[in-house]
Image (tube, rainbow, N blue to C red):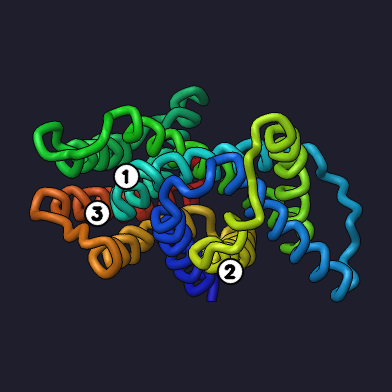
Amino acid sequence: MTALWILVSSFCSAAIIACIQSLGQTIALIDLAFVQFSFVLAVTVAVMLAKKVSFRTHVWHLHLLRSLFGVGVVFTQIITATHMPVAAAQTLQYTAPLFVAGITAAAAYRRGEAVDWRVLAAVAAAFCGILVMFHPSVRSFSALYVLVGLFCGLLTALAILILKQLGNLHESVPRTIFYFHLHGIVILGLLEAFCGQLTFEQVQQAPLALMLVFVICAQFARTHGWGKGNTFLGSALTVSGVVFATLFDAAFFGEVPGPRSLLGMCIIVLAATVCLRLTIAAEAKNKL
């Protein structure tokens, strides 16, 4: 069941990126993020009141840390989505399992434990896949956005680890979503007050309304799947978003991936799968 939640989250994430790309330059980054966080916060508060879920928490520091990482993910995701094809942006974001494996290897090394070279080889292979996919002679976007996408993957991995801790502490799904968007709306509210240019006409756009629906679904599915399930299993299954993103690219934007891009995606998915198997094996042996 946990796997199903992660797959739903992956599909919704790819759909969100497609909606953002459909919006193009009709709405600014700050305005888009502000609308997104405001909508999810309002819906979450309504759910908590209806289900009588308490707003009190004893792990506010974890919520705050997760919010910082999560807000960073939202911004970097929007930046890559507006400057790259859907599949490319999604693939870079879902290097998160590779970062989880890298953090695991680094932690083991610091503790003086033997580092499994196969994990490091898989991470290296994944980044080779990225290089194959975004070959300088064929890509049509700046290398800066590739770096932004990789940073998004790192922030996603850190957010996953915090989200897992909250799940282990039995924080409810609505409360976890509530604090994430509460902290985010404070930051975005300040930015919107000084830099925002949001208009009523922008809010009425159909792609934006559709995006908000997918955002709600993604938040609840992601929080439930990552918080209740195995961290590494959840991380690896998010790679399925690459497949969904490729379908969106081909169906709506005419961005049919070539052989080189398909090869790069296959390498990344294979490397993520290897990392998954190795990290689960290490967890079973109490190496994590």
Q: Quadrant of residue 195?
A: top right
Which mark is first along the chain, 3 or 1?
Answer: 1
Q: Label 1, label 3: how many angstroms apart (C-alpha)?
A: 23 Å
Identify residue for label 2: 213
Looking at the image, residue 170 sits to the left or right of residue 147; the answer is right
Q: Is residue 198 above or below residue 168?
A: above
Residue 130 in the image: state x and y as whole percent: 23, 40
Residue 175 in the image: state x and y as whole percent: 79, 58
Identify residue for label 3: 270
Looking at the image, residue 53 sits to the left or right of residue 175; the answer is right
Task: Say few, some or many: other residues with alpha carbon within 10 Å of mark 3 (under 14 / 14 to 19 / 20 or more).
Answer: some
- The residue mark sitting in front, 2 or 3, is 2
Looking at the image, residue 223 sits to the left or right of residue 87; the answer is right
Q: Label 2, label 3: how many angstroms apart (C-alpha)?
A: 31 Å
Residue 221 visible in the snapshot: no
Identify residue for label 1: 84
Residue 145 in the image: state x and y as whole percent: 35, 34
At horizontal 32% and vertical 58% (from top left) the residue drawn is 242
